[in-house]
Image (spheres, helix red, strand yellow):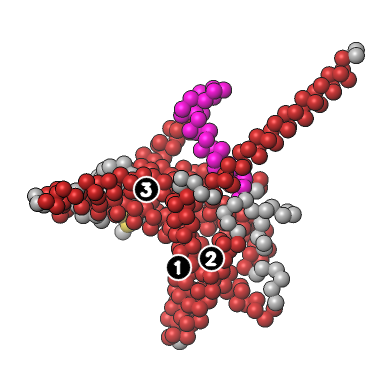
Amino acid sequence: MAEQAINPIEQFNVSPLFSSHKLGHTDIAFTNASLLMVIILGLVSLLMIYGTSRRSLVPGRLQAAAEMSYEFVADTVRGTAGNEGMRFFPFVFSLFMFVLFANLLGLLPFSYTVTSQIVVTFALAALVMLVVIGYGLFRHGTHFLGLFAPSGVAKPILPFIVLIEIISFLSRPISLSVRLFANMLAGHITLKVFGGFVVLLLGSGTAAALIAPLPFIGIIILTAFELLVAALQAYVFAILTCVYLNDAIHPGH
Amino acid sequence: MANPPDDDAAMKARLKELSGALDSHRKAAAAPKVAAGAPSPNGMGQAMSLGFRVMSEFVAAVVVGGFIGWAIDRWLGISPAALIVFGALGTVAGFWNVYRIAAQPTGPRRDSGR
């Protein structure tokens, strides 16, 4: 019983909330992860729709939050991908808000961290890469492939450069998804392990119980740090999306 | 009838003033962000995220290169040859990724020309 309570991995279990449904051979059950995603979508929509519905000149709290998030992402997009990148603003904004809310909601006790599943983060990263490739080909045609052959490279080493650039390009979705996933996973496991220390020390019934507050202080500091990491990783995800989109808009840099 | 030119001049002056205010506002909005990149309360978090970014970019490139080599090996049956070549290429690509991060920090990219 106690062992199960402090199992640091248990928090990442995906379990169906209702009896599972099958589509062909694929299980498409509505799980706790799905529930969290629906809640995230609901909260983001609520913030943006309700927050901007009042449109007062002096913004209230919700409106200020909505406007700040808009301006923050707009500045990021404009600063990284230029004014032309603004056509991807809705895309980047949705990604940023989804990741941010997923990270932040995951910090609440008894909730679930959607972004600690590599399936989710890789799906997001793959979406980004597909948009980059799709838009690059649509906009520049085969000229987009010039992304892999930088200008001013001597002919004999060009094949190597092209190979390296292709590997570098293919590594992007992996590093993008693994970074977010690993940050979330490591942070939550660390929190849970420290929480386990507190319980074990208190439950030991010896003098060791006296040092139980130490890991507890650790939890408090780590939670603050995780809050920072949650926001920072959402920002990093958004800004790298912009950097990659910039490649699709201006290939051959 | 003496009004229009006068009005026009006033309008122009006002416009200039406004655009000046807008410029300074924009500069003010841009300035703190540059400052925030330097030491700040969350400098530790940012430094860690940058470090983690460098690591993940490097590892991802090596893994992708190794995977391509392994797949080609399996496909052509030339067991370690392609793995070695593509592993090396992946490592180079990893260094290239890291170099790009270092040479061009996540600040605004110059929008030259186009």
Q: Secondary structure at mark 3?
A: helix
Residues tagged 3 and 1 counted as in contact (Cβ below 8 A): no
Q: Label 2: which residue?
A: B98
- Tell me if mark 3 has few (under 14), some (14-19) or many (20+) residues whose alpha carbon lies within 10 angstroms of its own: many
For the residues beneath circles 2 and 1, the answer to whether they share a chain is: yes
Q: Residue at x 57, y 46 (%)?
A: B35
Residue nearer the viewer, B23 or A153: B23
Q: Looking at the rendering, in which quadrant would you find the C terminus of chain A? A: bottom right
Compare marks 2 and 1 and give the one earlier in the sequence.
1
Of the two numbered discs 3 and 1 in the rendering, the one whose residue sits closer to the viewer: 3
In reply to whether residue A250 is colored magenta, the answer given is no
Q: CA distance from mark 2 to mark 3?
A: 25 Å
Amino acid on which the number 3 mark rests in the picture? Glu
For the residues beneath circles 3 and 1, the answer to whether they share a chain is: no
- Tell me if mark 1 has few (under 14), some (14-19) or many (20+) residues whose alpha carbon lies within 10 angstroms of its own: many
Q: Residue at x 46, y 80 (%)?
A: B83
Residues tagged 2 and 1 counted as in contact (Cβ below 8 A): no
Residue segment shown in magenta: A52-80
For the residues beneath circles 2 and 3, the answer to whether they share a chain is: no
Q: Label 3: which residue?
A: A226
Q: CA distance from mark 3 to mark 1?
A: 23 Å
Q: Label 1: which residue?
A: B59
Q: Chain of mark 1?
A: B
